[in-house]
Image (tube, grey):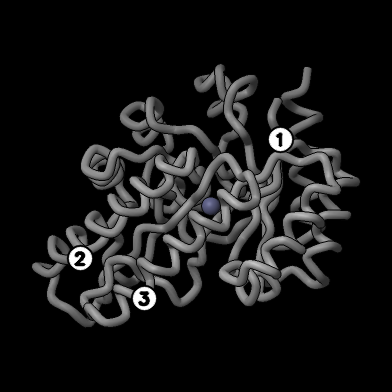
Amino acid sequence: MILGVADYPGLEGSFEDFLNFASKLKVRVLELKLDRLELLLSFSKTDKILKLKNLSNSYDFKYFVHAPNVDTNLASVNPLIRRVFKKTILKAVIFAAELDAGLLVSHVGRLSRDYPRKLVRKAMKNSTDSLREINQLSSDLGIIFTIENDHKSNDYVLAGYPEQINFLIENVGCKLTFDIGHANTIGKIEDFTKLLDKFIVNVHLHDNNGKEDEHLPIGKGSIDFMEVFKRMKDWRSEKPLIIECHSFAGLKKSIDFMRQEFLR
Ligand SMILES: [Zn+2]
C-alpha cells in the first residue's frame, strides 16, 4: 500500500516539524501544501527553494505538491486577479519541478453565488484555459498535473459532479486527484469511480457525514471505506493513498486504521 499524508496550513509547528511527524508514521508520500505560510513565502524565491530542497532531500519521502488554494480561484470572472492566480499556479509547477516532485494538484475554482447561473459556462472556460497552460508546463517539466474534485459549496462548483470533472479532464488533458471525502458531500462514490477511475492517479482520504467537508479521521464519518476498497481493488497496491485530515491526531489515527484494516 502506498500510504501518504498531506500537510495542512492550520497544523501547528514548522514545516520541519511536519516532516518529522510524517517520518515517525513511516509513510512513503508527502503532499506538501503551498498554502503553508512558510512555503507560500518561499516557493517563488530561488535561494529559499534551495533551502527547502535540501531539507526535503534529507528525508526519504516521495513528494507531491498541492498548489496554493486559499484565496485562489482560477475560474474568477475578474480578469485582473485571474491572471495572478494562473501565474501563481504556474510558479507552483516550477517549484514542484525544482523539488523533483512527481505530481502537482490544483483546485479548479468556483463561481460566486452573487453571479447569475448562466455565467457558470464562462467561469468553466476561464478555468479550462488556465488549466491547459498549467498542464502544458507540467508536462514539459515532467510533472503529472492533476485537478482535484470539489466538495459541496454555497457557490457554484465547477468540478464537483462526475460529469463536470470528466468534461474538464477531457478538455484539459490532465489527470485526477480523487478526493473521496469531497465526493461524499456531493453524491455516491461509486458514480464517481465508475466514470473517472481511468483518470485517477492520486487518492485523498478523509471522512465526513455526507453534508460538510469535515476532514474527519477515516472511520469516523459515513463513508464505507471497506466497500470502496473492495470495489477498487487496484487502489490498495497501485494508487498513492494520501490521508488529508486537519490534525496530527486525525492523520495518525487514519494511518493506523488503514494499516489495521487493509494491510493484510
Ligand atoms: Zn483533498
Of callouts 2 and 1, which one flags the residue occurring earlier in the amino acid sequence?
1
Q: Amino acid at mark 2?
A: Ala
* Mark 2 residue's CB less than 8 Å from ligand 1: no
* Residue 131 showing in the rendered view: yes
* Residue pointed to by mark 2: 123
Q: Tell us which disc is closer to us: 3 or 2.
A: 3
* Mark 3 residue's CB less than 8 Å from ligand 1: no
Q: Position of residue 49 (x, y in %)?
A: 67, 63
Mark 3 → mark 2, Cα distance in angstroms:
16 Å
Mark 1 → mark 3, Cα distance in angstroms:
34 Å
Q: Are marks 2 and 1 in contact (CB under 8 Å)?
A: no
Quarter of the view holding residue 190: top left
What number is the disc on residue 3?
1
| Left or right of residue 187, residue 156 in this image | left
Q: Position of residue 96 (x, y in %)?
A: 57, 52
Residue located at (30% from left, 47% from top):
161
* Residue pointed to by mark 3: 84
Quadrant showing the C terminus = top right
| Left or right of residue 135, residue 27 in this image | right
* Residue 220 showing in the rendered view: no
Q: Regarding mark 1 in the picture, which secondary structure is present there?
A: strand
